[in-house]
Image (spheres, rainbow, N blue to C red):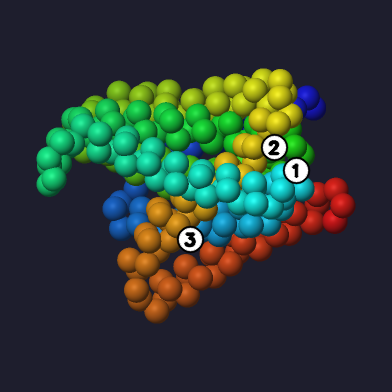
Amino acid sequence: MPILIQIILATSIISLAALGGAAALLLHKHALQKILFPLVSLSAGTMLGAAFFHLLPESLEDLAAEQAMLYVLLSFLSFYLIEKFLLWHHCHGEDCELDAKTYGHMNLIGDSVHNFIDGLIIAVAFIADPTLGVVTAIAVASHELPQEIGDFGVLLHAGWQYKKALLANFLVALTVVLGGVFGFFLAEGSEQVAHLLMPVAAGAFLYIAASDLLPELRQHRGHKQSMISITLLAAGLALMYFIGMLEPGH
């Protein structure tokens, strides 16, 4: 199957997570929390596993160690700045808060940028190696469902009607496909760009895990929840590790 078709297929499946997020909100709040916590735990493991077992080693094959680590650090810091800008650039006072309507629109803008970058990352991974592409797509998908549940809930909180919020969230989710197609032609046109985007992807995954997923898990302090969290995080790491055994050279 041509690489471009694989990229479009993988990103299209991920886009369907927006519909999954909407469907999940139909569940009772208690049931939804039971679903979200395991998803976030598994997502943290797959993100970290994809970064450390796949993206970083691939980066070190294509770039000098110092250069690769520099791009990982710059990527990590850039995602922090992007997030700060998207969430607060309309806020000019020290303690001001965005109203619900404004936050709903800002959330869509931030999600569009996030999804587009996810598409770029997936495209570059598929071009480097189809197995790496699958690993990266799984890591993105594992994070996308809990994220889309939250994004859809934000729109409803902002006063959007259910159907309008569903359509907006799905259209925004399609930007991952756009990012995938753009990333394919970008990386195909320049091998150097593809090499540079690999450590950028690693930095992005590390930032998401460190700033979003792991802090969320720390809020659950019960013994049972802690054991579930550790087990699923380890399962995500193991999944990424064993998929790596399928890559050429292993």
The answer to whether residue 200 of the structure is visible from this angle is yes
Report the front residue among 30 and 62.
62
Query: Please, which residue is most extreme toward the right here?
Result: 249
Q: Amino acid at mark 2?
A: His
The residue beneath circle 1 is 62
Residue 56 sits above or below residue 21 on the image: below
* Label 2–label 3 contact, CB within 8 A: no
Expressed as whole percent of the image width and height from the top left, the position of residue 73 reads 52, 50
SS class, disc 3? helix
Expressed as whole percent of the image width and height from the top left, the position of residue 175 reads 49, 25
The residue beneath circle 3 is 41
SS class, disc 2? helix
Q: CA distance from mark 2 to mark 3?
A: 30 Å
Task: Point out which mark residue 195 bears.
Answer: 2
198 relative to 245 in the view: left or right: left
Q: Residues within 10 Å of mark 1 (few under 14, many from 20)?
A: some
Residue 194 sits above or below residue 237 on the image: above
SS class, disc 1? helix
Q: Amino acid at mark 1?
A: Asp
Q: How many marks?
A: 3
The residue lying at 77 percent from left, 39 percent from top is 129
Decide which of tag 3 and tag 1 comes sooner along the chain: 3
165 relative to 188 in the view: left or right: left
Task: Point out which mark residue 210 bears.
Answer: none
The residue lying at 32 percent from left, 35 percent from top is 86
Report the front residue among 5 and 205.
205
Decide which of tag 1 and tag 2 comes sooner along the chain: 1
